[in-house]
Image (cartoon, helix red, strand yellow):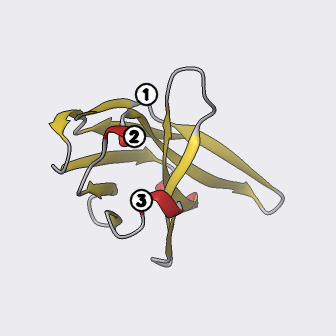
Amino acid sequence: QVQLVESGGGLVQAGGSLRLSCAASGRISSVIAMDWYRQTPGNQREFVARITTGGNTNYVNSVKGRFTISRDNAENTVDLQMNSLKPEDTAVYYCHSLVRENPFTTTDYWGQGTQVTVSS
């Protein structure tokens, strides 16, 4: 299993910055990719950013140029640097990992979520 713990959420004014961090523990060697998702009340969880074990990244269009995902393999952490925040970025942000269980199956693991609120 993989355990994920997020930190770094909070309240910020529009145009400000926040940095989210996700600390992973457990079967780290089996992680294929780490992602950030976000969710607002009444809506489905939305993909925000991904980083693979190879360091490849991709982002949802709405955050490109503003958010940066990075990982520290030595510390087993994945961060999301969020700049130029907008009120529409307000959501609960979740860390997610995709873990290879065996050659045929993968498992999704989620953190508990951290609230990000951007005031206008």
Identify the residue at the far front of this view.
120
In the figure, is residue 44 to the left or right of 60?
right
| Residue 116, picture quadrant | top left
**Residue 55, percent from left and from top:** 45, 77
What amino acid type should be assigned to the residue bearing mark 3? Val
N-terminal-most mark, 1 or 2: 2
Tell me what residue is drawn at x 30 percent, y 46 percent.
86
Q: Nearer the viewer, residue 37 or 108?
A: 37
Q: Which residue is mark 2?
A: 88
Q: CA distance from mark 1 to mark 3?
A: 22 Å
Q: Which residue is mark 1?
A: 112
In the figure, is residue 25 to the left or right of 12?
right
In front: mark 2 or mark 3?
A: 2
Q: Is residue 72 visible?
A: no
Circle 2 — which element? helix
What amino acid type should be assigned to the residue bearing mark 1? Gln
Tell me what residue is drawn at x 32 percent, y 38 percent.
87
In the figure, is residue 99 to the left or right of 106?
left
Q: Are marks 1 and 2 in contact (CB under 8 Å)?
A: no
In the figure, is residue 37 to the left or right of 65?
right
Q: CA distance from mark 1 to mark 2?
A: 21 Å
N-terminal-most mark, 2 or 3: 3
Q: CA distance from mark 2 to mark 3?
A: 11 Å
Q: Using a 10 Å C-alpha cutoff, classify the residue at mark 1 as few (fewer than 14 neighbours), some (14 to 19) or many (20 or more).
A: some
Tell me what residue is drawn at x 30 percent, y 56 percent.
79
Tell me what residue is drawn at x 18 percent, y 51 percent.
15
Quarter holding the N terminus? top right
Circle 1 — which element? loop
| Residue 81, picture quadrant | bottom left
Q: Which residue is mark 3?
A: 63
Q: Is residue 15 above or below residue 91?
A: below
Q: Is residue 9 above or below residue 18?
A: above
